[in-house]
Amino acid sequence: MPAIREHELYLNDVDDDDGMPPLVDNPNSSMTFTFFTDMTPITALSLDPTVPCESSWDNPAPASPVDFAESEYPATNQTADRVSHGKKRDASYIPRPPNAFILFRSSFIRSQQVPEKVEGNHSTLSKIIGKYWKTLPREEREIWEAKALVAQAEHRKRYPDWRFRPGANALAKLKVKDGPGIANRRRSNQSTKKSRGDAESKKKNKSKDERCSMIADLLVEGKTGAELECALRNWENGIGREVGAVKGAVNREGEDGFEGGDEGGWGGALPSTIACDHHHMESVQPLEDLYHSTHNTELNIDGRDQPRCKTPPDDRFKVPLTAMFKRSLSAPATHVDVPDHRRHNSIASNFSDVTSDAASSPPSLCSPSTFPSDQYEDHSIAVYNDSMGHLSPLVLPSGLGDGSPARWNDPYNLFGAPSPTALLPNCPGLSYVNSPSVSPVDMSFGNYTFPSPTLAALTATKPQNISAGLDYPITYDTQSYSSYSALKGWADGQCASFDTLPEPLVQHVFVNQHTGAPAIYEWSPFDDTVCVGHASQLHNAFESSYFDSFGY
DNA sequence: GTGAATGAAAG
DNA sequence: CTTTCATTCAC
C-alpha cells in the first residue's frame, strides 16, 4: 500500500486506499454518562496545558499532569494551525497523541523549574528531563501514563479514523528532496556524530552530560528556579565538583539499565549543603531525612512521599501502565451504533449528568438480580465488553476543588483527597466523600476494613490479557476473574446486583476485589449510562443494605 | 517476529 | 537537536 500523507488522510480521504471509513468529524453519539452530584467530569476541569499546574513541582515531585486531552486537541477541524516545534503544518494535519513522557516534558517546561538562564536549549532540556523522568517514582509516572491514556482516548474520540502513518511525511519530503532519504540521514547523522568526535569534543560532551545529570539530580532533590540555579552555579564553580563527578557516575550507572541497589542512589547528593543564602538554606533537606523519605516503600498515605532514587532497584518501570492497555490507539474505533432510545439519562437524582460522545453498545448482559460466582466469568466478560468497555476515562471525577495540590486534581484522581476531614457519620474511617477514587487510607465498613489500595498494589494485580476493539482498552484476567478498564484497578471485581437499591438508580456495581471497595462502577440497566461511584456514597445513601449484600 | 523509523513537544 | 514512548513499517 502506498504511503499516505498522514494529514491528508482525514479530511480529504476520498483517495484513501486503505479501506478506512471516510472521515467523520467526531460523530457525536450523544452518549450520556451520569455521575454523582459531587463528581465532576474531568472534561470540566480547567486543565489547559498552557496553564502551569498549580503548586506543581513541589517537593520535588512533578506537577499533576495537566490535562492534555481537551485543550490540546481543540474542537475538530481546528487542529489546523497547530505548530509542532516550529514547523508549519497543513491546516488539516493531525498530530500524534502525546505519550506520557511528552506530556511530562511539556508540563515540566511550562512550569519553568529550570530557569532559562540555567538551560534554554530544548535539546539539552530534553536530556535533563529524560534523566529526571527516570527518577520518577512509579506512582508519579503512572499519573502521566494515565494522562497519556486520557489524551489518547480524547484524540481517538476526536479523530476516530486517524492512524499513525510513520514515514508519510518523510516520504513526502523524500520526493521533494530526492536525496538519500530523511530516514537514512537521520540515522546516519546520529551514528556519525557519535563515532566521530575527537578526544576534546568527547570531553566536552561528557561535561555537558555531567551538567545535565547534575541539573536532574538537583531537581530530584527538589531544587528549582533560583535555588537550582544557585546550586548549579556552586557546582560549576568547582565547589562540590568532585562530588558532582561521583553523582554523575551514579547517574550514568542508573542509565545503564538501573543497576545497583537502593543504597547507591543518593550517594552524592551534596550541593544542597552549600546554600546561596539563608533563604535557600531553609529549604535544604538533610541528606539523612532525604534518604529515608525517598526510600520509604511503605504505603504512602498521601501519595506525596513516593520512593525515588536514581538507580531504581526493582522492575517498577519495566511494565509501564500503558502497556497494560496496549492496543493500537491510532486504529479506527470500532463503530457501534447505539439505538437512540438508549441514549438518555437514567440514573436519577443524586447524579448529575454529563455528555460524552463515545460510541456505545447495548447495555450490560449482567443479570440484574443475581450473579452466581460459577457464572461469573462469562457474565463479566459480557458485562465488560458491553458496558465497561465504554467506560470512558472522561467519566472520572475531578479533585475536590478544595485547594489541594494539583496532583490531587488529576483526572484519574489516583490518590484520592489529601485530607481525611470529611468523614461520613456512617462510615468511620472513610474520608473522601467527593472522591470516587482509589483511596489512600484504609476504609472500614462494619467489621471489614478495606486495605489501602496503592497504585502499586493495583499494578500488582495487572491483567493478563488484553482485548481490543472497544472504545477503551479493556483487559480481562481469567485467573482471578477480574477485569480492568482503562482505569486500572477500578473496574476489577465482582459484579453484584443490588436488588435493595431503588431502581433504576443503581443496577450493577463493580467492586474492586483486590483492593476492597473504594472504587465502584455502576451503570444503568436501561441505557449505556455509566458512572463511577464511591462506596461511601452508596453507603451513605443506602445504608447497610449495600454492605449487607456483600456479607460485610 | 524483530528491529528500524517516525513523530509526538519545544525553541 | 534531544528525550521517551507508541506505533507502524520493512525485513
Image (cartoon, coloured by chain):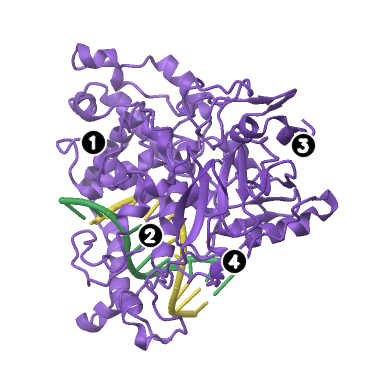
Chain colours: A purple, B green, C yellow
Mark 2 or mark 3: name the one nearer the start of the chain. Answer: 2
In the displayed structure, would residue A387 be above or below residue A337? Answer: above
Work out whether residue A405 or residue B4 is closer to the camera in this orientation and state it.
A405
Spatial CA distance of label 4 from label 2 is: 25 Å
Q: Which residue is mark 4?
A: A361
Spatial CA distance of label 3 from label 1 is: 52 Å
Q: Amino acid at mark 3?
A: Phe
Work out whether residue A422 or residue A457 is closer to the camera in this orientation and state it.
A422
Mark 1 or mark 2: name the one nearer the start of the chain. Answer: 2
Residue A475 occupies quadrant:
bottom right
Instruction: Using residue A509 as the reference point, say whether residue A137 is left or right of it.
Output: left
Residue A527 occupies quadrant:
bottom right
- Label 1 CA crowd tier, 10 Å (few <14, some 14–19, many 20+): many
Q: Which residue is mark 1?
A: A114
Q: Amino acid at mark 2?
A: Pro
**Badge number at residue A97:** 2
Q: Are marks 4 and 1 in contact (CB under 8 Å)?
A: no
Q: Which residue is mark 3?
A: A550
Q: Amino acid at mark 1?
A: Val
**Badge number at residue A547:** none
Work out whether residue A28 or residue A460 is closer to the camera in this orientation and state it.
A28
Marks 3 and 1 share the same chain: yes
Mark 4 or mark 3: name the one nearer the start of the chain. Answer: 4
Mark 4 or mark 2: name the one nearer the start of the chain. Answer: 2
